[in-house]
Amino acid sequence: MSSFEGGGGGEKKYVEFCTGVNGLDKVILREVRGQSAEVYLNGGQVTSWKNEYGEELLFLSSKFGMHGSLEQHGFARNTVWTIDKDPPPFPTVSSNKAFIDLILKPSEDDPKSWPHRFEFRIRITLGPGGDLMLTSRIRNTNTDGKPFTFTFAYNNYFYLTDIRFSHDLL
């Protein structure tokens, strides 16, 4: 699920549940040195990742392209994910306290755009050094046992103060 430290007495809270833009549910992950990541349950999307100086490391854009007949960037980004209260073991460093486990299962509306049964789990972790880690697991839950093919991707957009430094990211 997620981990907490304290809540009172001045102890550090690593995972905070709150309301974000347009009243959407949001989770903020924090590390001791001030790094943070912001995750919306709507789309299971990381919308902010800041270093210890509060500088934003991600660039968000509203300009997306179409991918065939699916919604822009697929349907998972337009679906509300739930907090996975009983996730299977994920590989993780035991000292990571700032993480959240999310799960996406098909709804009754999904067969219109995606006729297969599945579970998509993701653990979003903010490591002790401020590293952002996303670990995904996708499972076929079709009762007929028929395989299906799929693709998924993390669409990374890093904020750059100067385009000349972009070669360091490649």
Image: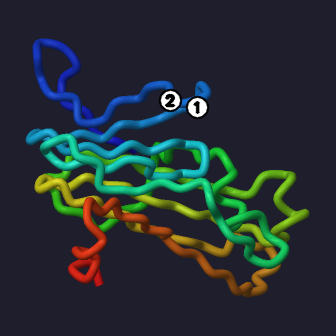
* Disc 2: CA contacts within 10 A as few (<14), some (14-19) or many (>=20): some
Give 52 or 19, whichever is nearer the viewer.
52
Secondary-structure class at tag 2: loop
Q: Quick check: 109 left or right of 49?
A: right
Q: Are marks 1 and 2 in contact (CB under 8 Å)?
A: yes
Mark 2 lies on residue: 20
Residue displayed at 31% across by 48% down: 99
Give 165 or 23, whichever is nearer the viewer.
165
Q: Amino acid at mark 1?
A: Leu
**Which quarter of the figure is the N terminus placed in?**
top left
Measuring from the top left, give residue 21's x and y in whole percent.
Answer: 54, 30
Mark 1 lies on residue: 24
* Disc 1: CA contacts within 10 A as few (<14), some (14-19) or many (>=20): few
Q: Amino acid at mark 2?
A: Gly
> Which residue extends farthest right?
112
Q: Quick check: 27 left or right of 91?
A: right
**Which colour assignment does the render follow?**
rainbow
Q: How many marks?
A: 2
Residue displayed at 80% across by 78% down: 68
CA gap between label 1 and label 2 equals 5 Å
**Which quarter of the figure is the C terminus placed in?**
bottom left
Is 44 above or below relative to 53?
below
Give 49 or 3, whichever is nearer the viewer.
49
Q: Quick check: 39 left or right of 110?
A: left
Residue displayed at 19% across by 30% down: 5
Measuring from the top left, give residue 143's x and y in whole percent.
Answer: 79, 72
Secondary-structure class at tag 1: loop
Residue displayed at 11% across by 56% down: 129
Is 111 above or below relative to 146?
above
Q: Quadrant of residue 2?
A: top left
Q: Quick check: 102 left or right of 170?
A: right
